Each structure stands twice: as C-alpha cells, then as structure tokens.
Image (cartoon, rainbow, N blue to C red):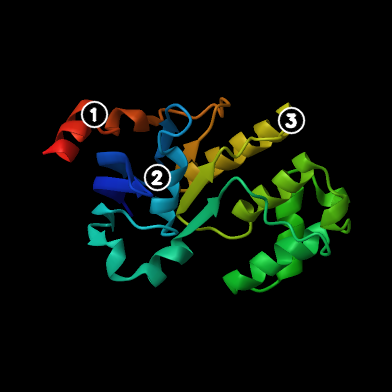
Amino acid sequence: MSLFQGRDLTCLRGARVVFAGLDFAIPPGGALVLVGPNGSGKSSLLRLMSGLSRPFAGGLYWDGMPVADDPGEHAPRLRYVGHLDAVKPALTARENLAAWAGLDGGGEAMGRALAALDRFGLAHLADVPGRYLSAGQKRRVNLARLALARVPLWLLDEPTTALDRAAVARMAELVRDHRAAGGMVAVSTHTDLDLTDPDILDVSDFAPDPAAAFAEAMA
C-alpha cells in the first residue's frame, strides 16, 4: 500500500516565501484537508503535490522514493482538479470526458465517459456542447474525470465551487468510495464534504516569521 509524503517543503512565489518547513503524510484511505486564509499557499501546495511546480527546498516521496527521481511516473498516479474547468466548448460533455479517458488507455472511452457523467447526474447532458453548459454543469463535468479510472491520489482545489447541494453530496459520495478502495485525497475546500477522520493541515502555520525574514534580509 502506498504512502505519499512531503518533507520539509519550502515554496516560493516570485521572491516571496509562501511556506517553509512543511511536512505532510497521506496513507492509503487517508484524507488531508488544507485550511488557511487566502494566499496562505493551499493552491501552491496542491500544485507541488501534482508536480506542476517544484519545491524550492524539501521533497515529495512515494513509498519512501523521491518523486523528483522520476516525475513521469508520478503523473499517472493522480488526478488534479484546479480552479479552471478544462471543458472544451466545441465538444459535448461526453466527448470532453472521452478525450480524458483516451489518455488513460483503458479502452471503451465513450462508455466510461457516460458512466462518469452519470455519477454526477449529467447523463442527460452527454450530447450537449460545452459552450451551452452552466458554470455548475461544467464544474461537474470536470469533476467527473475523477470517476474515469482508478488512480491512487486525488488533489482537489476548491472542488465544490459552483456546485449545488445535490452535486456536493455526489462529490462527497465519490470521495468516500475512493477512500474505501484505499485511495488518497488532499483537498482545499470551504464546504463540508463530510469526510471521516481527515487530517487537517493549516498551511498558514508554516508561513515565515516576518520579523525573522526582515532581520535575515538586513543581515
């Protein structure tokens, strides 16, 4: 069973240290909820976890092995859902998901796409082009990527934005099923997803001390 860890992570945004000395560990079936004020680095941490950016210091480890040793091996382990919805306006909802399913190489892309849409109550919109979908519907199409194929790690940045109560309930159910199968999830959210026994990580606890940073700069 896999263990995903970050050790002594430091993140820079431009010339500013966002956080430093940050550690986390997500075991199989585990959930890590990221909290903290806007700008504290929750999205930055998720991007580090995904491999979309690299830490200034520290490292990420999968079963004790440095992720940086083989970044290409890390990408297929995860699904990352950020703030933007990657829904192409000219493609139907099903075609959008089928394109993602095709990248998995699991076969039956159209069938898997329809099943994933059904998990979010969107099967009746399968043939509607993305340009005609509402913000909430686009969000659900994007989240339906999670149901296309089983991967161990989900990284979710405010996944419930633009979702109604019913869609949030479907999302929570999907996360529960994922964890029950041994999957891991790291999520930044202001909405209660009814997670069982999550670990809470306040990213702002790892912000650099302003006085110490000023003293170091003046030294």
Question: What kind of element bears circle 2?
Answer: helix
Q: Point out the frontmost of discs 3 and 1.
A: 1
Residue 213, position as x, y percentages in the image: 21, 34
Q: Residue at x 22, y 57 (%)?
A: 64
Numbered mark located on residue 209 in the image? 1
Identify the amino acid type marked 3: Asp
Q: Label 1: state its secondary structure.
A: loop
Which corner quadrant of the image does residue 100 belong to? bottom right
The alpha-carbon separation of the residues under discs 2 and 3 comes to: 27 Å
Residue 76: give x, y in percent of width and height.
47, 65
Q: Which sits earlier in the primary sequence, circle 3 or circle 1? A: 3
Vertical relation: 211 (above or below) 153: above
Q: Position of residue 177 (x, y in %)?
A: 55, 42
| Type of amino acid at the residue the image marks with label 2 | Leu
Circle 2 crowding by C-alpha within 10 Å: few under 14, some 14–19, many from 20: many
Q: Is residue 92 above or below residue 104?
A: above
Reading the image, the residue beneath label 2 is 45
- Please report the residue visible at 72 percent of the width from the left and 27 percent of the height from the top: 165
Alpha carbon separation for disc pair 1 and 2: 19 Å
- Between residues 106 and 34, which one lies in front from this camera angle? 34
The number of discs equals 3
Q: Residues within 10 Å of mark 1 (few under 14, many from 20)?
A: few
Q: Which mark is residue 164?
A: 3
**How far apart are labels 3 and 1 at the CA level?**
39 Å
| Lower position in the chain sequence, tag 2 or tag 3 | 2
Q: Nearer the viewer, residue 99 or 15?
A: 15
Residue 26 appears in the rendering:
no
In terms of sequence position, does the residue under pointer 1 or pointer 2 come before the other? 2
Amino acid carrying label 1: it is: Asp
Residue at (60, 42) in percent of width and height: 174
